[in-house]
Image (cartoon, rainbow, N blue to C red):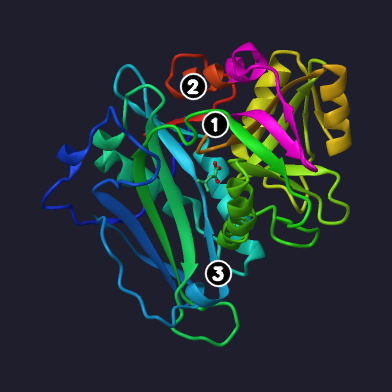
């Protein structure tokens, strides 16, 4: 099993747990936060003062640099309980790697593995009662790093704060999503920051998504910034299709986030000897497959939703309905397999699970 080096973390426990206020049978995503949070500061080139404290409001100067110039990055991950009540994290070391990739691109300092992992471990251990066991639920974990200089000149901050907060939550999407292929706005361009988890990537998506929602879609499919023909991501997720029994997803690059769920789905598909292609896929190819009746499945993959089934794709004023979701075989099977691995019910052949 993977272990992290111990670091000293001061712990100030809450005097009054809020766990009694939670209805674990009626959990929504991201609205209620567990009792504690982890915090660590970066100053003079060093990480200092790692601590766990009661979750609560934070005081900050209105001149805090992250608020003005977006030195703000985050991760999303989940904790589950197995039948013995042990808490398991899914691929946390991959999240650690990715937050440092994001940090590098945004001119922020790396977070040492022992701070990330030990912070996570001690925080989740302390709040383990908050890890739901109800069907479809988990403890969503949000590590994030922000520049904290009290300075509004444009430059990388000299000081930073790393937080981990957690929220028990249910499904991100309660039903299959209708998506609109976006051909005016773009999410990411080559040379940009689309491959990292920078907060600004999400902020810039809100307006185009709002316009799509006004037209009756829940999410958009992002297209390439040059010609708007190649499909990139769906909403906040990676995008996959099953066409003629082949699993196809856009290749990683500057404009695509290296999703951990994306990688897990591709790995499982390969384990199952399914044909997998990481390659460019255009809207024309998808519509053509739809016309020929070979477009079997379309779905998004991400930490929050795991698998988000797509029921309809809108493009240039026409809606293309996908085969009924109940009939989709691969996305249901892989979703179940991931669920079983995360809850310790299926063999973890890739060593993805990290026991707290
Ligand atoms: C994910 O599912 O991986 C996400 O990033 C969604 C999150 C922004 C809620």
Q: CA distance from mark 3 to mark 2?
A: 34 Å
Q: Position of residue 86 (x, y in %)?
A: 32, 25
Labels 1 and 3: the sequence-earlier one: 3
Determine crowd level at label 3: few under 14, some 14-19, many 20+ residues with C-alpha closer than 10 A: many
Left or right: 225 in relation to 132: right
Which one is in front in this view, the residue at disc 1 or the one at disc 2?
1
Is label 2's Cβ within 8 Å of ligand 1? no
Query: Of the residues under marks 3 and 2, which one precedes in the sequence?
Result: 3
- In this rendering, the count of numbered labels is 3
Residue at the disc numbered 1:
306
| Position above or below: 130 against 275 | below
Magenta residues (range): 308-334
Q: CA distance from mark 1 to mark 2?
A: 9 Å
**Which residue is at 28% across, 64% downward?**
57
Residue under label 3: 71
Q: Return the mark for residue 339.
A: 2
Work out whether residue 197 can be spotted: no
* Residue lying at 48% horizontally and 67% vertically, measured from the top left: 146
Q: Is residue 212 above or below residue 275?
A: below
Q: Label 2 crowding class (10 Å Cα cut-off): few <14, some 14-19, many 20+?
A: some
Of residues 267 and 68, which is closer to you in this image? 68
The quadrant of the picture occupied by the C terminus is: top left
User: Marks 2 and 1: in contact by CB < 8 Å?
Assistant: yes
Circle 1 Cα neighbour tier, 10 Å, few/some/many (<14 / 14–19 / ≥20): many
């Amino acid at each position: 099993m993977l272990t992290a080096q111990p670091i000293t973390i001061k712990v100030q426990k809450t005097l009054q747990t809020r766990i009694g206020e939670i209805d674990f049978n009626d959990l929504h995503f991201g609205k209620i936060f567990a009792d504690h949070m982890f915090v660590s500061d970066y100053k003079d080139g060093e990480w200092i003062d790692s601590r766990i404290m009661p979750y609560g409001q934070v005081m900050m100067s209105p001149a805090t640099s992250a608020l003005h110039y977006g030195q703000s990055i985050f991760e999303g991950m989940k904790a589950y309980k197995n039948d013995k009540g042990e808490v398991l994290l899914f691929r946390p070391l991959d999240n650690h790697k990715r937050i440092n990739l994001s940090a590098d691109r945004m001119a922020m300092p790396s977070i040492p593995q022992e701070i990330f992992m030990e912070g996570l471990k001690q925080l989740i251990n302390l709040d383990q009662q908050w890890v739901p066991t109800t069907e479809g639920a988990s403890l969503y974990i949000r590590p994030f790093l922000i520049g904290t200089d009290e300075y509004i000149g444009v430059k990388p901050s000299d000081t930073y704060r790393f937080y981990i907060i957690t929220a028990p939550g249910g499904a991100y999407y309660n039903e299959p999503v209708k998506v609109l292929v976006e051909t005016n706005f773009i999410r990411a361009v080559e040379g940009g920051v689309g491959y990292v988890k920078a907060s600004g990537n999400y902020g810039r998506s809100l307006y185009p998504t709002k316009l799509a929602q006004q037209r009756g879609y829940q999410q958009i499919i992002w297209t390439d910034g040059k010609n708007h023909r190649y499909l990139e991501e769906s909403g906040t997720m990676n995008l996959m299709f099953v066409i003629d029994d082949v699993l196809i997803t856009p290749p990683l690059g500057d404009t695509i986030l290296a999703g951990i769920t994306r990688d897990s789905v591709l790995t499982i598909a390969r384990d199952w000897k399914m044909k997998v292609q990481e390659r460019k896929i255009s809207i024309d190819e998808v519509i053509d497959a739809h016309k020929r009746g070979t477009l079997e499945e379309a779905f998004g993959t991400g930490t929050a939703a795991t698998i988000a089934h797509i029921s309809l794709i809108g493009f240039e004023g026409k809606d293309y309905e996908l085969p009924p979701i109940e009939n989709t075989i691969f996305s249901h099977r892989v979703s179940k397999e991931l669920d079983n691995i995360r809850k310790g019910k299926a063999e973890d052949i890739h060593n993805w699970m990290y026991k707290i």
